[in-house]
Image (cartoon, rainbow, N blue to C red):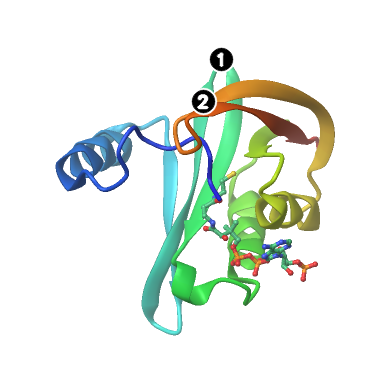
Amino acid sequence: MAAFTSADPDDRAAFDAHWARVTADPGIVNRTIEFGGEVVGHVASFEQGGEREVTYWIDRAHWGRGIATRALRFFLAELPTRPLHACAAADNAASIRVLTNCGFVAYGTDRGFALARGAEIDEVLLRLDH
Ligand SMILES: CC(C)(COP(=O)(O)OP(=O)(O)OC[C@H]1O[C@@H](n2cnc3c(N)ncnc32)[C@H](O)[C@@H]1OP(=O)(O)O)[C@@H](O)C(=O)NCCC(=O)NCCS
């Protein structure tokens, strides 16, 4: 589903190194998502090209329960920066829905090379202004 991933998502050492950088970077706001006392994902925001973006992942076993939508809503209430940006692969309907559920509006499209697809793909650009 997620298109813009690391080169090899199964490389645990690379993942741990990446996660260590993410959690040490004061410019990245990163929150653990808990559901029923269990860790089920994370929601984060980071700067890219002078714009603040949001991103989120939910454990597949918990998809379809409204968790991403609720987690992003809580996160947006905590994070005052506006506008906030997001981009999703055009075929990632669930992610686009999570964003529009939370008030993001699609304003354009772009093309980007997606490691997870091994190809250039269409992406949807979204923004939250208020
Ligand atoms: C995208 C993702 C975060 C969604 O998490 P989730 O907790 O299942 O999302 P929600 O339950 O809040 O569902 C959001 C909406 O998407 C819809 N949806 C779920 N799967 C869908 C699918 N395959 N196609 C279309 N819509 C879908 C739901 O029905 C819901 O719509 P509704 O609010 O109108 O009822 C999760 O699938 C995920 O972690 N995917 C891998 C990582 C990823 O893609 N991250 C985003 C990168 S941009």
Q: Looking at the image, which residue is at 67% across and 21% down?
A: 111
Q: Position of residue 20 (x, y in %)?
A: 22, 39
Q: Give the residue type at disc 2.
A: Glu
Disc 1 element: loop
* Left or right: 90 as drawn, with respect to 31: right
x and y percent of residue 37 in the render? 39, 82
Quadrant hosting residue 40: bottom left
* Relative image position of residue 125 (x, y in whole percent): 73, 31
Question: Neighbour class for label 1 at 10 Å: few (<14), some, many (≥20)?
Answer: few
Of the 4 image quadrants, the one containing the C terminus is: top right
Residue 54 locus on image (x, y percent)? 58, 40
Read off the residue under disc 1.
Answer: 49
Amino acid of disc 1:
Gly
When asked about the image quadrant of residue 7, the answer is top left
Name the residue beneath numbered marker 2.
47
- Please tell me whether residue 127 is drawn above or below residue 78 in the rendered image: above
Residue lying furthest top: 49
Eyeballing the image, is 103 above or below 35?
above
Image quarter for ligand 1 equals bottom right
Could you give the CA–CA distance between mark 2 and mark 1, rounded to whole angstroms? 7 Å
Label 2–label 1 contact, CB within 8 A: yes
User: In this rendering, does residue 76 appear at all?
Assistant: yes
Q: Nearer the viewer, residue 54 or 61?
A: 61
